[in-house]
Amino acid sequence: MVDASAPPPVHDGLEFWQFMIAGSIAGSVEHMAMFPVDTLKTRMQAITSATKTSSLTLRQSLGSIVKFEGLGGLYRGIAAMGLGAGPAHAVYFSVYESCKKILAAGNPNSPIAHAASGVCATVASDAVLTPMDVVKQRLQLKGSPYKGVCDCVKRIMVEEGFGAFYASYRTTVVMNAPFTAVHFATYEAAKRGLMGVSGGGGEEEEEEESLVVHAAAGGVAGALAAAVTTPLDVVKTQLQCQGVCGCDRLSSSSILDVVGMIKKKDGYGGLMRGWVPRMLFHAPAAAICWSTYEAVKSFFH
C-alpha cells in the first residue's frame, strides 16, 4: 500500500533538457489526438450573432463539417498546431518543473507552489504558441481563405502586421493563468489522493496503476479548468478570428470590451459557446498529456 502521508520528492532529478523533451512529446501527442474536437470548438465559438448560435449543437457542427468538407475538414490547421505545440509544451513543462523545485522547497505538497509554477509556465509557453494558435484557428474556420500555414502567415503579416499574431496574447494569458493554476493544483491533489487509495502489487502492476492514476488525475484537472475558463476562451477566439469568414472586426482588444460586445449580441450564453467540446477536449487531452509526460520521465529515469 502506498503511504499517502509520505511527501513526494520535490524534484524528479532530471535535467532541464529532459523535461523539455518530455513536455514536447506530451504536448504534441495531446493536440494531435484531440484536434478534431478543437476544430468543433473553434467553429462553434467563431460563429457571428447573425447565425442562430443557440440552435447549433455539437452534433450539428460535426455533421456539417463531415457532410460538406469530409473528414479532412476536422484536421485543417493541424500542421500549425504541430509546429507550435512541441516547442510550447517543452517550455511549459520545463518552466513548471524548475519553478516547482524553487517554490516548493519547503513544502512539496503545497498547492500554492504548484499553482504559481503553473502560472509561470503558461505565461512563457503562450508567448511561443500564440502565433501558431492564431494561424491554426483561422485555418479551422468554415470557408477559410488561406491555402495553408505559410499562406496564412504571409497574408497576416502583409495585411495586418506582426502584431496580429499577438492580438490575443493578453487574453490568452489572462485565461490560461487561472486555467493552469486550477489545472496543476487539481492534478497534484487528485494524483496524491488516487495514489493514497491505490493498492500495492508487483512492479509491472504498480507501473500500470501509476499511468492510470496520472491519466485520471489529468482528466479531472482538465475538465474542471476548461469549464471555469470557457468565457475567456470565447473572447480569445473572437480576437484571433476577427475579420475572417464573417467574424466581426473588433475595434478594441480589451477583454472587457469584447465581453461586452458578446453579451450585447448573444447574451450571457454567448460567453459559454463551445463549452461542451472544450471540456470534451481538455479532459482526455490532459489525461493523454500527463500520462505521456510521466511515461517519458520514467523512461529517462
Image: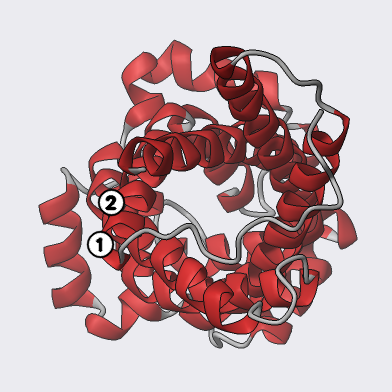
Q: How is the image coloured?
A: secondary structure
What distance separates the C-alpha of mark 1 from that of mark 2?
6 Å
Q: Residue 208: x and y, percent?
A: 58, 18
Please give the name of the residue rendered at 73% of the width and 39% of the height, measured from the top-left corner.
217
Q: Is residue 164 above or below residue 82?
A: below
CB under 8 Å between discs 1 and 2: yes
Q: Residue 66: x and y, percent?
A: 46, 14
Taking depth in this image into account, of 211 and 128 the one nearest to the observer is 211
* Residue hosting label 1: 17
**Res 236 quadrant in image:** bottom right
Amino acid at dot 2: Ile
| Residue 44 showing in the rendered view | yes
Q: Residue 250: x and y, percent?
A: 53, 78
Taking depth in this image into account, of 249 and 65 the one nearest to the observer is 65
Q: Residue 44: x and y, percent?
A: 62, 41
* Residue hosting label 2: 21
Q: Is residue 15 left or right of residue 64?
A: left
The quarter of the picture where the N terminus appears is top right
Please give the name of the residue rendered at 60% of the width and 70% of the height, measured from the top-left corner.
118
Please give the name of the residue rendered at 32% of the width and 20% of the height, measured from the top-left corner.
72
Taking depth in this image into account, of 30 and 293 the one nearest to the observer is 293
User: Quick one: SS at disc 1?
Assistant: helix
Please give the name of the residue rendered at 81% of the width and 58% of the height, measured from the top-left corner.
228
Amino acid at dot 1: Trp
